[in-house]
Image: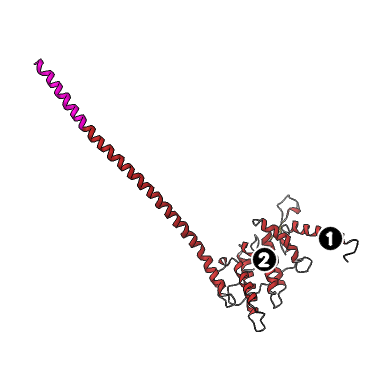
Amino acid sequence: PAHWAGSHVLWRLQHVGARLFSAAFVLQCGFLPHAFLAPPPGTDDRDATCVEAAGGVADDVLGGHGGQELPPCRPEPWVVPVSGACLWDEGLLQIELLRPTLDRGRAAPEEPILHFGRQVIMRHLWFTFDGAYAAIPELVCLWELACWPLCEDPRLIREAFEYLKGTCRELRGCDARWCPQHEQSLFQMFAALDLSRLPCQALLSPWVPPQVQMVRLWMQQQPAEHWHAELQKEVTTAAEHLKSIKLECSKLTNKLNIVEQRTVINKSQINDAIGIIGEVQRKRREPAA
């Protein structure tokens, strides 16, 4: 009860537990099923490090889909099998604990915090999948929490993409819960994924909104437009540079013409001087003769 004298103790215990969870989140690979790498010989056993499942450095990890290869692309949604057991499955850890931790991960995207958080969220979605997908409002909150636009792991993106395909099929079913707001939310969740990291065949499904195809094509066209803009800028700069070079060449040509004219004048003056000197020498020789 709120009036219980020891309620502050529970609050402090909860606060300490949240801080401990945040501090150990990366070290414990998001508290997902994982394996530990043996420490080098001669070192303490406590120096063993864990390796994570999707997008990680080992293939023998027990998280998510157990390190299995992704199946080939097909129109129907793919349901990811969940293997292993962890504290998330037993309900000892709640998704709400992720919020402060993933907020810290957004401030440091180079760290694996967000990656582990996305794995936890996808495992939660697949573990609770019993033939029915999560409700759209709940899925939107989890999608925002995962911060998918920063994800670069094709495996995780494929899992999220397949889950959205199944959600879209469920919304369009006979007993559908379809409404314009849900359709808009679903499209926004599709758009949050970097679909350029998936093969083109993955999008060939009736459960992928056509607007998603347009967004993907537009995203693929963006690098070409950026390259074209840079090329246009370089061409403009080169044209300005050539224009300045042409102006300098024109100035040098004018100076060269002036130098040539002075050379002709100096040559004429030298010839006149030579003629005068020769005439003076000739006159001096005549009286002597």
Task: Check the picture and name the quadrant holding the C terminus.
Answer: top left
Q: In the image, is 146 to the left or to the right of 277?
A: right
**Between 284 and 93, which is closer to the camera in this rendering?**
284
Question: Is residue 50 covered in magenta?
Answer: no
User: Seen in the image, is 141 located left or right of residue 210?
Assistant: right
Q: Which residue corresponds to the image point at 51% horizontal and 63% vertical from the top-left?
A: 222
Secondary structure that dominates the magenta span: helix
Dot 2 surroundings within 10 Å: few (below 14), some, or many (20 or more)? few
Residue 48 is situated, as x and y percent measured from the top left of the image, at 73, 55
Against 109, residue 176 (above or below) is: below
Query: Which mark is on residue 144?
Result: 2
| Furthest-bottom residue in this view | 174
Residues 276 and 202: in front is 276
Q: Quadrant of the N terminus?
A: bottom right
The reply to whether residue 62 is visible in this rendering is: no
> Residue at (78%, 57%) from the top-left corner?
19
Tell which circle, 2 or 1, labels the residue nearer the N-terminal end: 1
Q: Position of residue 77 (x, y in %)?
A: 62, 76
Residue with the mark numbered 1: 11
| Label 1 element class | helix
Residue 178 position (above or below residue 63): below
The chosen color scheme is secondary structure
Q: CA distance from mark 2 to mark 1?
A: 27 Å
**Magenta stretch in the rendered image:** 268-289
The count of marks equals 2
Q: Tell me where residue 180 appears, x and y as whole percent.
A: 63, 77
Q: Quadrant of residue 12?
A: bottom right
The kind of residue on which mark 1 rests is: Trp
What amino acid type is highlighted by mark number 2?
Glu
